[in-house]
């Protein structure tokens, strides 16, 4: 059976199927496009996974949390840690359960975590984390207070190794299944932002800032 | 300053702020609503985090992969493993960077992973994983072949401990910041499905099946 080459929409195009690799540029692209990182570390011999906001500056990744939390305390002193970001792009339906899959872009970063002690690096990291979520937000905010800085622990992950995995495109079914009346294809999945909703105590006339538009353009 | 109680849309309502807990019912609710799990295990002393599709049956969680992959081979024999699912519901903008946050529902499951060797349990698990993504899909599919079953490794995580964390509602700013002209509020985030896109070799007249509608209703 001859398969015609269809005129696919962008989300269905095969960029590269099941690509596993170590492409740093692609890794950075995925890291910069994600909202939540899933951070792995070892606590008393057990693997922990915690969702965190984050930012990338060059070959360093930053996460933050209350100084008193386990993830900050456990990872202060140069321990092995990892960070994974996955962007889900679609559900893939094959004719067989075996050929079901998901379209996704994913990066797994391994490195060594340590506490950021330098105050300048800490400030730059906090600005980057804030701006990662909504570009330009740091400059719109009221400045950090000393007590807030003290209550916040920032960890840096010095990136030692990245691996990426990407799946795009339609299902890849077995020849025996082609032509049957079982539907196969993809359902695109995307993350969308709703309308901003102001806190009740925002004075009349204070409008949603530029950073929200920037976030919408970045992620949606 | 008195804060008036606004008429909030459902996504902005405070169900419980920064709730950390061990509520099994809530944990199951989050597990059943997620599409991708972030699985943690230890490989040669390093914490690994891998995104996986999954399913829950009672107090057991199932993941699957090619029998030859590291995650399947490393976790065959009763080793500590964890699985985290996070649903992102919104970005939270405070007046200060310090009071920025995300609205989310997250569960972290700890347990012991082992390979599923019983063929009946393996079949039930594979059906559950397929139906987790799109309810009813297993029954629509062509039956699994022996060679496909053999090529697929299924791991079970016997759940030993769950912890949940949920944040909902608007930012919680400091009294000194209220009334300033810095915007504060939330931007809802949601996962949406696009229109199904049939593979090029699906015969004319074969329409998207009921499982896709079911998936759409479940996740979107």
Image (spheres, coloured by chain):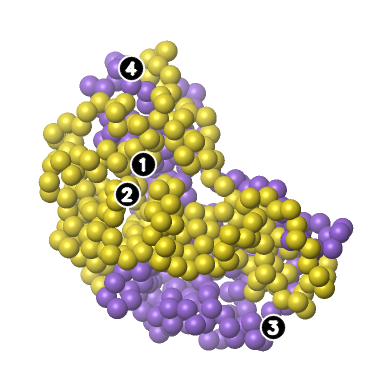
Chain colours: A yellow, B purple
Q: Which residue is mark 1?
A: A132
Residue A56: give its label.
2
CB-based contact (under 8 Å), mark 3 and mark 4: no
Which quadrant holds the N terminus of chain B? top left
Q: First in sequence, mark 2 or 1: give its number.
A: 2
Disc 2 from disc 1: Cα separation:
8 Å
- Disc 2 with disc 4 on a shared chain: no
Q: Residue at x 32, y 66 (%)?
A: A161
**Image vertical order of residue B114 relative to residue A69, above or below:** below
Estimate how packed mark 4 is, as few (under 14), some (14 to 19) or many (20 or more) residues with alpha carbons within 10 Å.
Answer: some
Subunit that carries the residue with mark 2: A
Q: Nearer the viewer, residue B81 or B200?
A: B200
Residue B145: give its label.
3
Q: Nearer the viewer, residue B23 or A95?
A: A95
Percent x, y for residue A37?
A: 38, 53
Percent x, y for residue B215?
A: 65, 54
Tag 2 secondary structure: strand
Q: Is residue A100 left or right of residue B113?
A: right
Q: Residue at x 12, y 49 (%)?
A: A117
Disc 2 from disc 4: Cα separation:
30 Å
Q: First in sequence, mark 3 or 4: give its number.
A: 3
Residue B181: give its label.
4
Q: Residue at x 22, y 40 (%)?
A: A124
């Amino acid at each position: 059976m001859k398969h015609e080459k269809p005129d696919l929409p962008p989300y269905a195009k095969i960029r590269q199927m099941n690509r596993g690799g170590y492409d740093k540029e692609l890794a950075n692209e995925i890291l910069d496009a994600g909202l939540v990182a899933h951070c792995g570390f070892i606590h008393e011999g057990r693997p922990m996974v915690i969702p965190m906001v984050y930012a990338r500056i060059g070959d360093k990744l930053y996460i933050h949390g209350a100084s008193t939390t386990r993830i900050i305390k456990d990872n202060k002193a140069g321990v092995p840690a990892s960070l994974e970001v996955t962007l889900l792009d679609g559900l893939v339906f094959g004719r067989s359960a075996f050929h079901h899959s998901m379209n996704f872009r994913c990066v797994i970063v391994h490195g060594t975590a340590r506490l950021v002690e330098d105050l300048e690096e800490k400030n730059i990291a906090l600005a980057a984390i804030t701006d990662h979520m909504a570009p330009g937000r740091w400059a719109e905010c009221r400045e950090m207070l000393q007590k807030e800085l003290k209550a916040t622990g920032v960890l840096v992950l010095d990136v030692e190794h990245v691996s990426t995995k990407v799946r795009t495109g339609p299902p890849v079914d077995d020849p025996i299944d082609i032509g049957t009346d079982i539907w196969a294809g993809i359902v695109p999945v995307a993350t969308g932002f709703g309308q901003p909703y102001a806190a009740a105590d925002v004075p009349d006339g204070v409008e949603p800032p530029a950073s929200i538009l920037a976030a919408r353009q970045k992620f949606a």
